[in-house]
Structures are given as structure tokens and as C-alpha cells.
Image: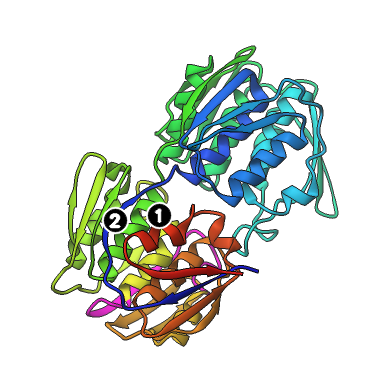
């Protein structure tokens, strides 16, 4: 199994580019099941989850043809009525996005409970999807964690999300495109990835209004045509790189990003005292004289993203004072802080959703194991500023969301090696 070996304490400098957004790229693969023709995708990140999504499309009779420089052609002309394979459903949470398009095209679909990392695996319910499909006319049978959905014809419905869900919003929005009549989705997620997906679907013949607000209205159409889709820059990666620059007191230029997607982070940076400059498509981080502690609470977009919480916890270990970090989205996302404590962090877990962090402290290198994607990048971040050497195992989880991470960090001066 591959691992990272990182020697910390190096001052970073130079330019680093942001890849295409994982959470936008993954959703275009199931759209191919709804489409007559080819989708030409550009700025596709080279990630494990994207490879799995391509394998899922091909397992269902479609094609995912890769070219150079992140360009793919996606097509599903020979799509057949599916049993979504367990071998792929168990590997990434976003596999559930194939359910709606398969159901609306075929009238039936069967699948096991989707997997992923410890954050996204079997304990996370999929009620938001099932309830939506049921309201659109699907019959659902469940046995031992395996689901079978059938529907002669999905029809538009009024659907209220009891809990804001990005994947739930995207799944039911894309499914409603080919359903009969009008679907009204309420209490929707407002993330930029939702807007990007709706914009592409509309260009392909869909009739969607309200993406980026809490209410989305979809009028069903007969078919979608192919088209061109450029994956938007990854705002989570951009924010993570910004915090790496801040915590290591380095000067780095983060390119190919959209700073307007990270306003909650800039609000925190202003309170902490991070030295940064925003440009149209880039972010400049400079060393700050002193970083001050600041509380943070995760929230759905445009609030502070849960995916940026683990890196922020590491940043908080280097700020002067006490910070309270409150995770409101995922139950087990703060458990990784125990590994930061092993590295010397002063962190007290108040309860499963809140930690109290006192700083600044010196971190020391340790042998660690990445429990999930976002905790993994936080451990890399901690290792970059720690004294001595850190080994991080199970970096498959990190590869799921960060393209060629060791190469890009080494380019700005990090001492990081990937070994098998």
C-alpha cells in the first residue's frame, strides 16, 4: 500500500494550480445515462473517484474515453437496464448518483448501499434519495442493505428536503429532467457545483430554474443532447492550499481558482490575521506576523464548508489563543484530531461535534494512517509543519480527492515522497 513520507518544517514558495472540482466532475458521468450523444468533458481531475465513476459508466454499457490534459468523451448509447455492481458501489459514495438516471431511463434499478470512506460509508443514510424517488412514483423494496426500485414512468412532484443535501439536490434535479411534468425541489443545496450542473443540463436541452437558490423548478423534457462541459475549479482544494500557505508562513500563489466561491474562508482569514490577496482567478498567500485564534462552525454553502474543517483544525493549532470548532454536518469528522494530539496538538474533544484547540504548539512527526479524504489532507498539512519525519499510510483515501498531490506540493518546496 502506498504512503507519504514527509519531512516537515520547510518554507514553501512558488505557484500551485487548482485542479477541476471533484464534486463537480463526478456528477457528469451519470448525466451521460440521460444523454443522446457525446459529452466532451475538459478540466477533469485525475482522481481515484473519477476513475471509479468512469468504470461505473462502462459497467452499465457506456463509454468513458480518456484523452490528454483532462479531456474525456462520455457516452451511453448502449446503456442497458442495470444492476449497479457492488464492487463499484462499495468504493465511492457518489456511486449513488447513477441510481436516478438509471431509474428514469430504464424504469428499474437495483443496487447495494453505497460505500466510500469512514465518513461516507454504510452508516450514512440514503433516505433523501429514496424519499424523492418514491414521491416521483418509484416503488422501493429493500432487503439486507440491497435496494430495488421500479417505476413505469417517473412523474414530477413537490419534494422538500428535510436536510440540505448537495448530492440529493443534484440527483433529483437530474432525474427530474426526463420525468413527466414539473418537479419542485425545496430546501435545496446552493453550492457552485449544483449551479454548474444545472447550467450544463440547460445547455443540453433541460428546463431548470432556480439553481443556486433554495428552490429549484424542473420541467421534464423528452431527451437531452450531448455537449461540452468544463469542470469548474475545486474550491475545497483552493481553500486547503490557502491554509497550507498560511500555516507554513509561506508565500504561494494559488492559480486557476474562483475566490468568490470561498467568501466564508476569507471572513475567517480576516479575523485570524492571514496575509492574503484575492485576484480574479488566483489567491496570493504571504507570511503573517501573528495568527490569532478564531472559532469556526461548519454550515451548508455559502457557510464554512465541512470539507475545509479538518485543514482549519490544523491551522488553529498554530494560532495564538483558544478556538472552538463545531462540526454540524458529519458525525465522525472530528475523530481524526486524536492523531493531531499524538503529534503534540493541544486539542480537547468537548463532544463528537466540538473540539477546543489551544495554540500555538509545536507538532512532531509520527506514523499515521489516513482515515478519510479530508482528514488525510489535514494530516499532510500537519506533517508539512511538524518537526521531523511523518509517515502517512492509506493514502488511497487522499488520492480520491487530490490529483498528484505529492508532485504539486514538491513543486512549491515541500519534502514529500510517495513510496510503496
In the image, taking residue 152 as reference, residue 270 lies left or right, namely: left
Q: Name the quarter where the N terminus is drawn.
A: bottom right
User: Quick check: is 325 in the magenta stretch?
Assistant: yes
Say which mark, if any, is on residue 187: none
In the image, taking residue 109 as reference, residue 253 lies left or right, namely: left
Look at 71% across and 40% down and name the residue there.
56
Q: Secondary structure at mark 2?
A: helix
Give the magenta part as a residue range.
317-335
- Locate residue 68, reporting x and y percent: 52, 35
Residue at image mark 1? 305
Look at 46% across and 41% down and name the residue there.
189
Residue at image mark 2? 265
Whether 413 is drawn above or below 264: the answer is below
- 265 and 385: which one is in front? 385
Q: Main secondary structure of the magenta part?
A: loop
Q: Name the quarter where the C terminus is drawn.
A: bottom right
Q: Quadrant of residue 7?
A: bottom left
Q: Quadrant of residue 270?
A: bottom left
In the image, taking residue 327 as reference, residue 279 lies left or right, namely: left
Q: Dot 2, crowdedness within 10 Å: few (<14), some or many (≥20)?
A: many
Whether 120 is drawn above or below 108: the answer is below
Q: In the displayed image of the protein, which residue is found farthest to the top?
A: 222
Whether 339 is drawn above or below 64: the answer is below
User: Quick check: is 416 in the magenta stretch?
Assistant: no
- 37 and 372: which one is in front? 37
Kindly check if marks 1 and 2 are in contact, taking CB atoms under 8 A apart as contact: yes
- Locate residue 276, reporting x and y percent: 18, 57
Q: Secondary structure at mark 1?
A: loop
- 136 and 315: which one is in front? 315
Amino acid at each position: 500500500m502506498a504512503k507519504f513520507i514527509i519531512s516537515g518544517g520547510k518554507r514553501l514558495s512558488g505557484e500551485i494550480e487548482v485542479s477541476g472540482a471533484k464534486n463537480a466532475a463526478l456528477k457528469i458521468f451519470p448525466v451521460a445515462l440521460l444523454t443522446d450523444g457525446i459529452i466532451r468533458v475538459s478540466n477533469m481531475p485525475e482522481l481515484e473517484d473519477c476513475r471509479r465513476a468512469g468504470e461505473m459508466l462502462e459497467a452499465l454499457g457506456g463509454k468513458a474515453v480518456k484523452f490528454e490534459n483532462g479531456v474525456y468523451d462520455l457516452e451511453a448509447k448502449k446503456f442497458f437496464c442495470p444492476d449497479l455492481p457492488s464492487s463499484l458501489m462499495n468504493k465511492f459514495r457518489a456511486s449513488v448518483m447513477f441510481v436516478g438516471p438509471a431509474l428514469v431511463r430504464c424504469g428499474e434499478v437495483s443496487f447495494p448501499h453505497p460505500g466510500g470512506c469512514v465518513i461516507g460509508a454504510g452508516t450514512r443514510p440514503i433516505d433523501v434519495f429514496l424519499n424523492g424517488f418514491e414521491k416521483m412514483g418509484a416503488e422501493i423494496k429493500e432487503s439486507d442493505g440491497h435496494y430495488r426500485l421500479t417505476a413505469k414512468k417517473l412523474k414530477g412532484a413537490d419534494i422538500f428536503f428535510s436536510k440540505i443535501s448537495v448530492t440529493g439536490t443534484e440527483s433529483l434535479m437530474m432525474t427530474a429532467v426526463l420525468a413527466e411534468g414539473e418537479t419542485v425541489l425545496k430546501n435545496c443545496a446552493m453550492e457552485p457545483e449544483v449551479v454548474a450542473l444545472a447550467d450544463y443540463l440547460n445547455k443540453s436541452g433541460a428546463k431548470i430554474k432556480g439553481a443556486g437558490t433554495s428552490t429549484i423548478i424542473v420541467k421534464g423534457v423528452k431527451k437531452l443532447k450531448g455537449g461540452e462541459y468544463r469542470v469548474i475549479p475545486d474550491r475545497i482544494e483552493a481553500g486547503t492550499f490557502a491554509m497550507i500557505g498560511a500555516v507554513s508562513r509561506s508565500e504561494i500563489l494559488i492559480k486557476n481558482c474562483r475566490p468568490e466561491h470561498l467568501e466564508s474562508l476569507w471572513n475567517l482569514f480576516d479575523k485570524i490575521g492571514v496575509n492574503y490577496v484575492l485576484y480574479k482567478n488566483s489567491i496570493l498567500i504571504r507570511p503573517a506576523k501573528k495568527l490569532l485564534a478564531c472559532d469556526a462552525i461548519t454550515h451548508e454553502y455559502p457557510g464554512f464548508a465541512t470539507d475545509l474543517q479538518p485543514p482549519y483544525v490544523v491551522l488553529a493549532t498554530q494560532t495564538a489563543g483558544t478556538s472552538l470548532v463545531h462540526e454540524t454536518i458529519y458525525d465522525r469528522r472530528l475523530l481524526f484530531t486524536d492523531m493531531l494530539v499524538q503529534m503534540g496538538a493541544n486539542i480537547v474533544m468537548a463532544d463528537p461535534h466540538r473540539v477546543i484547540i489551544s495554540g500555538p504548539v509545536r507538532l512532531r512527526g509520527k506514523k499515521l494512517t489516513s482515515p478519510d479524504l479530508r482528514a488525510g489532507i489535514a494530516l499532510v498539512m500537519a506533517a508539512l509543519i511538524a518537526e521531523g519525519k511523518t509517515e502517512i499510510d492509506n493514502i488511497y483515501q487522499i488520492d480520491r480527492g487530490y490529483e498528484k498531490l505529492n508532485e504539486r506540493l514538491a513543486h512549491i518546496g515541500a519534502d514529500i515522497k510517495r513510496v510503496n
